[in-house]
Structure formats: structure tokens, C-alpha cells
Image (tube, rainbow, N blue to C red):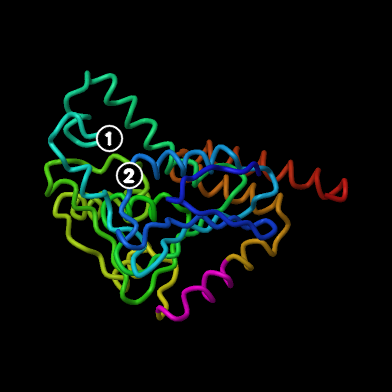
Amino acid sequence: MTAVDTDGRVRTSREGAVLTVTLDRPEQLNAQTPAIWTALAAVGASLDDDVRVVVVRGEGRSFSAGLDRSLFSADPSTPGGLGQLGSMPAEQTQERIRGYQAGFRWLRSPGIVSVAAVQGHAIGAGAQLALACDLRVMTEDASLRLPEATLGLVPDLTGTSTLAELVGYARALELCVTGRPVPAAEALSWGLANAVVPAAELDTAVAALVAAITAPPVGAVRETAALVRSAVRNDPQAQDAAERAAQTRRLAALAQGG
């Protein structure tokens, strides 16, 4: 993995096959900016084949409180602000948002399993970052919230597709339209969280999950993750074919000692 200049907003560390990505604005509750999304996208673009797990964290007492307040400015001269985006030609606005989405979508790239370690608030862009990951471990005091509609906006950082995959149409619609918070216990019961632990146990729980993910052979984990991801979109016949193809590759690899 090549070095990435994140300008102090996003911190990365690597231990073997595990890459940890940390939002590093604790004094602003890790509120997000276009610079953070650019940094996240750069991390994704720099991944090498040896990375198996990506852990996403937030420094301090909150995972991420959403958009930085400066972005809510109606002044079109505020860089990255809503006023600036709203004053652009539609195609330019969409292209700008496409670039922001790239900071989130890579977390389900082939070859990796991503885990969000969520404490405190995960609001708006913060909730969408947690949802962009494959798995989520939450502390007992954590909550997820998508308040965009209550602000006259929509979730646009890949959140709607991943949320609907996890909880289904009706629950996803309710959460997105009302903007109500989902406490950790409810998130666990709905399948939004894979585990809920006391705050003091978050690091240990994440480490145990990472160890379990990296224990099986890398090829088997990558093929299985790809199958599970495709299962939510494929019809049964297409998914059956994907399973046959994946198993054929695994059998061939095992026969060759891989």
C-alpha cells in the first residue's frame, strides 16, 4: 500500500493484513468535509492485495457527527458548501457528488472485508460511512441517524442502497424520512449492528472480529464475501451460477496447494 497524504483529517495505520482508517477531528466530533472524502477515496485507491480487513474508526467520543457545520452555508463562495453545490450546473453538481461517494463505496471493494467501530454518534455522513462498511460493532451508547430529509436534503453518500440491503424497504424508508436515531440495541435487533458492547470493550470486540475474519484462507474469504455481496442483487439462477464458478475456482486452488 502506498503512502497517502491525508492532511491530518484521516489517519491510517497498518498491521499485517489489517488497515485501520481513523477520522481524526475529535474536537469537531469527526464532522466530515470534502477533504475527508477525498482522503478516504485516496486510501481506497491505494489498497494493495495484501490488505484483507479495513477497520474504520472515529477518534474521540463520537464516530462522526455528520457534515461539518461550515458546509451548511448558503453562500456559493463557501468551498464545498451546500450553497456552492446548489449554484452549479446540475451535471457538475452530480459529478462533484460522485467524487464524494468514491470515499465511501470502496469499503465494499473485492478482496477486503470492512468493519466500522462505532461509538457515540454516527449521524448523516457518519451513519453512511458506518453503513458503507460490511460489518459494524457498536458501543452500547452509540446510535445511527440519517437526518438529511429533515434538513431538506437526501442521503447521497451511498447510504440508501446499503441501508435497504440491511433492513429492508419499509424500515429504510422510515429511518430516512423521519431522521430518527436508531439506538445500538435496536440496531442490533435489526441487523444494522453485528455486535453491541460496552464502550470499554470496543477495541477488544473489534480485534476479535478481525481475527475471526482473517483466520480462514484468504482466497476462501474473498470468494465468500463476493458471493454474499452478489446474493442481494442476483436472481436465484444467477447466484447459483456464481456459487458454482466460485467453488470451481476454490477446488482448483486447493488442488494446486493454494
Task: Please provide percent x and percent y for residue 103.
Answer: 43, 41
Task: Please provide percent x and percent y for residue 77.
Answer: 19, 29
**Does residue 203 lie above or below 56 as drawn?**
below
Q: Residue at x 19, y 36 (%)?
A: 82
Q: Residue at x 21, y 45 (%)?
A: 70
Q: How dense is the environment of label 2, judged by Cα within 10 Å: few (below 14), some, or many (20 and up)?
A: many
Whether residue 79 sits left or right of residue 37 in the image: it is: left
Q: Disc 1 marks which residue?
A: 80
Please report contact status of discs 1 and 2: CB closer than 8 Å, yes or no.
Answer: yes
Range shown magenta: 199-209
Name the amino acid type tagged 2: Thr
Task: Please provide percent x and percent y for residue 53.
Answer: 59, 55
Per the rendering, the mark at residue 33 is 2
Dot 1 falls on a residue whose secondary structure is loop
Task: Please provide percent x and percent y for residue 110.
Answer: 58, 42
Whether residue 171 sits left or right of residue 149 in the image: it is: right
Q: Quadrant of residue 179?
A: bottom left
Between 120 and 76, the residue placed more toward the observer is 76
